[in-house]
Structure formats: C-alpha cells, structure tokens
Image: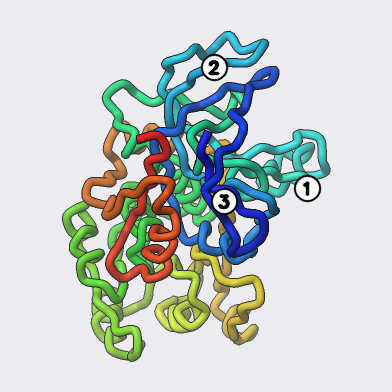
Amino acid sequence: MIAIVYTKPECFSIQDVQEPKPGPRQVMVRVKRCGICKTDLHIHHGRFISQFPLTPGHEFCGEIVEVGSGVAEWKPGDRVTCDNTVVCGCCYYCRRNQPLYCQNFYSLGCTGPGGLAEYALVNADKAFRIPDHMSFDEAAFTEPLSCVVHGVDMLDPKCGDKVLIFGAGPAGLLLSQLVQHCGAALVVVVAPTQFKLDVLNKLGVKHTVLMRRNDLTSHVEAVRALAPEGYDIVVDATGTPQIIEHAFQFTKMGSKVLIYGVCNEEDLIQVKPYWLFRNEIKLIGSFAQTHCFDRAISYLDQRVVCVDGVITHRVGLKEYAKALTLLADGKENLKIIVHPTE
C-alpha cells in the first residue's frame, strides 16, 4: 500500500509499504479521508509527542475491509471514524480514571502509524460507526471536534457566560459553535483573516472582529465594547505566545483562560502572579482527548456543530508536501483534507 513515511523530522517520502493485517481485536480500515491540522506541522518538525519512524495522520475515517480474531461487532463494509488515542489502562493515571494522562499514551499518527496511508489498523473499541447520512467529509472532523469537547469539559462554561476566542481556524470554528450551544450569552471571535470570519458568520456565530497581525491594538476597542466588564472565558486557539499575553487584558475577576492552541514547547509567556491571585483567574490547559468521540459524532449528526464550507483544500497522498505548505501559510485555507484512496 501507499503511505507517507517519516524517517526523522522534516524527512518524509511516499512509500509502497507492506499492507497491514489486523491482529486480535483489531480492524483494518481503508482510509477515505484524513484531515491535517497545525499539530501535523509540529509533528513534521519533530515536536509535540511525535516518535519516528512514523506514518502521520490522526484525523481519519473510512471503511472496514477486514477484522481480526475476536471481533464480532464489526464487519467489512462498515463505515467508521477512528479514535487515534490508545491508553494502557494500568498505569498510575489510568487506575485513577485519568486516561488522558496515561504514562504510556499512544496516538495513531503521532507516536504510531496513522491515517496518511491507504489502510490503517485500529483497535476495535476505537472505531465508531458513522450514521448512514453522514459523509466522510463530515466524519473527518470527529477527532478535532472530540478535542474541542474535551476543551469545553475543562472550561465547564455556565449559562450566560461571555466568551472571547482568538483564532478562526478549524479549532476556533468548532469551539465557538460548541460554547454557543452550551449556553454562552455572547461569543466573540477575533482573527486576522476576513474570509474565515465570514465562514463563522454563516455558521451562526454573530460577533466577529478583524484584527491586524502587526497591530494588536487595532481591535481592542471593538472587543471591549461588546463586553465592557470583560469576558467570563477567554480562549486562545492560535498557539501564539504574543496573542495569549494580549488576551489576558480582556478578562475580568473570576475569568477562565483556556490555552487551546499548540505553542512550541520552548515558548514562554509573561503573566503577573499577583494579577492571577487578586482576580482569581483560572488558567487552564487542554491537551487532546480520550472518550469524547461519541459526543462529537452526536454534535455533528444533529448539526449542533456544522462544518459546511470549512474544507478549503483537498489533496491526494502524493500532494502531502503541498498540503504542509498550505498549512504553514494558513491565511488562505481552513481545513485541508487528504484523500488517501481516491
């Protein structure tokens, strides 16, 4: 089969590799769609939790073509989306029912072979059925939406909260819709690209503010005017340290600040401890997800979260280098989807 194979950071090729065979309690999936995101850029550069050699791709869905021994719940032809996370179940954190902190955390597409290949092996319990009316395009959003579900779990928003989100990439698009559904009285999204904000407006997010990349003061007045007392929740979905520091000024006493975008490991931000203490600011991180796929599928199925118009580019496996270039630029694209078998 054809697959993207990294031998080390920034060094990959398209290879004809041996087709995998499902072991006990595994299924083999013919990959129909695999989304890529900024995490894939971090993996490309050898950051995040990546391990090499590696076939990347952690946002994938497709059709089961073969099942291993002991699998009775799946059969060839079943349409599935695949949870890339695998936890050991026996380490300190797993035994405390904190599986996301698993000390042996394994992730398809990050530390093990993922969906940027014609076929992928998935544990049977990590495959989730796609409703008949759901397209593979929609199903490809299950993993990123699952991460958003976990992020909102961490935030624990309250009815009537005023929420400010920096970033209108795919994560910002999903986050803004979900917190709006969770009872926020006001959701404001700030981003430097108008076409992304226009997509948000079409998806039902009313309040958007255009910012200038080289002048972070340009939007301050407009953002403050929408919530003069400040915001209950402020989210960074950019992974940019300067934006995170900038976002702090829009809080109020008792606010929650969510770091959702992926920064580089060595990045630093400055924050005054007294400000955190005096204002009882809750600084929250959100990393990946486990056990959120069922809710993500329901949100997509019921169109609580919509992805209409979010896919801007489609490429084949042989165009993966082009996809990375588009992803790094970021200005003229939203979701990039790879079609490994089409």
Q: Residue at x 44, y 69 (%)?
A: 238
Disc 3 marks which residue?
288
Q: Is residue 122 left or right of residue 135?
A: right
Q: Label 3 to label 2, Cα distance in Å?
A: 28 Å
Which label number is shown at residue 66?
2
Task: Give the vertical position of 191 relative to 178 (above or below).
Answer: below
Which label number is shown at residue 103?
1
Circle 2 or circle 1, nearest the eye: 2
Q: Secondary structure at mark 1?
A: loop
**Foreground of the two, 206 or 160:** 206
- What kind of residue is marked 1? Gln
Sequence-wise, the earlier of marks 3 and 2 is 2
Q: Residue at x 34, y 33 (%)?
A: 136
Q: Secondary structure at mark 2?
A: strand
Q: Secondary structure at mark 3?
A: loop
Q: Residue at x 31, y 21 (%)?
A: 132
